[in-house]
Amino acid sequence: MVHELGHFLAAKKAGIRVDEFGFGFPPKLWSKKIGETTYSINLIPFGGFVKILGENPDEPLSPEESKRALTSKPKIIQAWVLFAGVFCNFLLAWLLLSLGLLAGLPVESSSARQFFNRVSEERLVVTSVLKNYPAGQSGLLAGDEIVTIGAGEQKVTPKTAEEATTFIRAQSGHDILFAIKRGSENRQISVLPKIENNKAVVGITMGGVGVVRSTWYQAPWDGLKLAVYLTIETAKGLGHFFSQIFTSGGSAFGSVAGPVGLFGIIGDATKLGLVYLMSFVALLSINLAIINLVPFPALDGGRLLFILIETITRRPINAKFAGWANAIGFFLLIGLMVIISYFDVVRLL
């Protein structure tokens, strides 16, 4: 919705006619026309959409309509309207990260120490629990804080994931007792590890987590630095993913989540608390911004590429070609989403 709001506000400011701004996708539940724009609430609550006059290159327009169409505006205005969605995604991430830093943002300890030069309340937590492994079957959950790990007469108070992993792997044939803190509760959970490659494994990943807090005057600047850093790192990660699609086959899809997988991840983030959820939404917003800038038809980046080509060649791209390119790009994107969703479902099973 924030992404589409960016397009909406930029188009309105430029005097371009906006026919509809909708929450969710049809079928329509409610709508009201205010001025020349219809505002709607729709049944399928996945984001939203905005209908801008002239955004489809093969859309027939009357001479009167052409004056208010996106394509009638200077190239710089067209580019800004297309880029405004991405810009608002970045602004949302900046805002959420700044608010998170005011409240106390949970971060990976070693990275926080390097990035902010300060971190407090350090602890070792379970970051994920693998399906069909002993830890999950015994009741360990993502977000559990590990206080101690014991086996027989041995007991450790691990400070790092490496220290905990080394202890666990040496305990083949022994029950491992995890003393954990879950919210305000202290619990003990016994896990019998399975043996893989002559090493004991329980099926969890762990990470050192701390809290970074900023004062009200530090938070905007710290939030901006963090948003820029996450944008760069996310772009690198997505670039690696797209390169892996062509070199490693289907294995690349195991490292990403689609609409189905996101429900589970958001559920886990919600259990951990509001600040975790805010930081995850900020990361989602950054992902959406970067993906939309990919120069691929049907994405904002593809349309920006067309504008750049038209600016260089000083002539419009054939409307039918642009329309077909966008249609094919759309179906390829839907196909990619279906493939990723398939792997999401496989992981759930």
Image: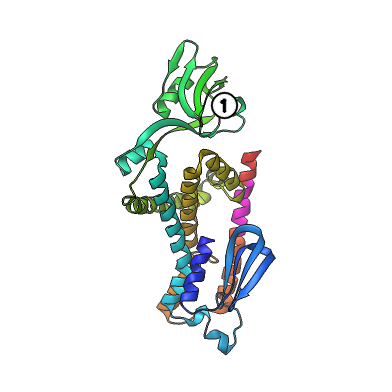
Viewer-side residue, 39 vs 203? 39
| Residue type, label 1 | Ala
Q: Give the extent of the magenta segment.
A: 334-342
The prevailing secondary structure element of the residues shown in magenta is helix
Quadrant for the C terminus in the image:
top right
Vertical side of 331 occupied by 34: above or below: below
Residue that badge 1 annotates:
135
Q: Say which of 178 and 252 sits in front.
A: 178
Could you say where residue 287 lies in the image, as x and y percent from the top left?
A: 48, 54
The residue sitting at the bottom extreme is 63
Q: Is residue 170 visible?
A: no
**Relative to 31, is 99 above or below?**
above
What x and y, as percent, mark residue 252? 53, 46
Q: Position of residue 15 (x, y in %)?
A: 48, 80
Report crowding for label 1: few under 14, some 14 to 19, many 20 or more residues within 10 A (C-alpha).
Answer: many
| Magenta span contains residue 341 | yes
Q: Is residue 28 left or right of residue 84?
A: right
Residue 336 belongs to the span the image colors magenta: yes
* Element type where label 1 sits in the image: helix
As drawn, is 18 to the left or to the right of 106? right
Report the residue that reaches farthest toward the top.
153
Which residue lies at the image location 60% right of the left edge and 51% below the top edge? 259
Q: Residue at x 46, y 54 (%)?
A: 286
Q: In the rendered image, which quarter contains the N terminus? A: bottom right
Q: Quadrant of residue 48?
A: bottom right
- Residue shown at the point (64%, 72%) measured from the top left: 32
Choose between 208 and 296: the one closer to the eye. Answer: 208
Expressed as whole percent of the image width and height from the top left, the position of residue 78 reads 46, 75
- Identity of the residue furthest to the left in this view: 117
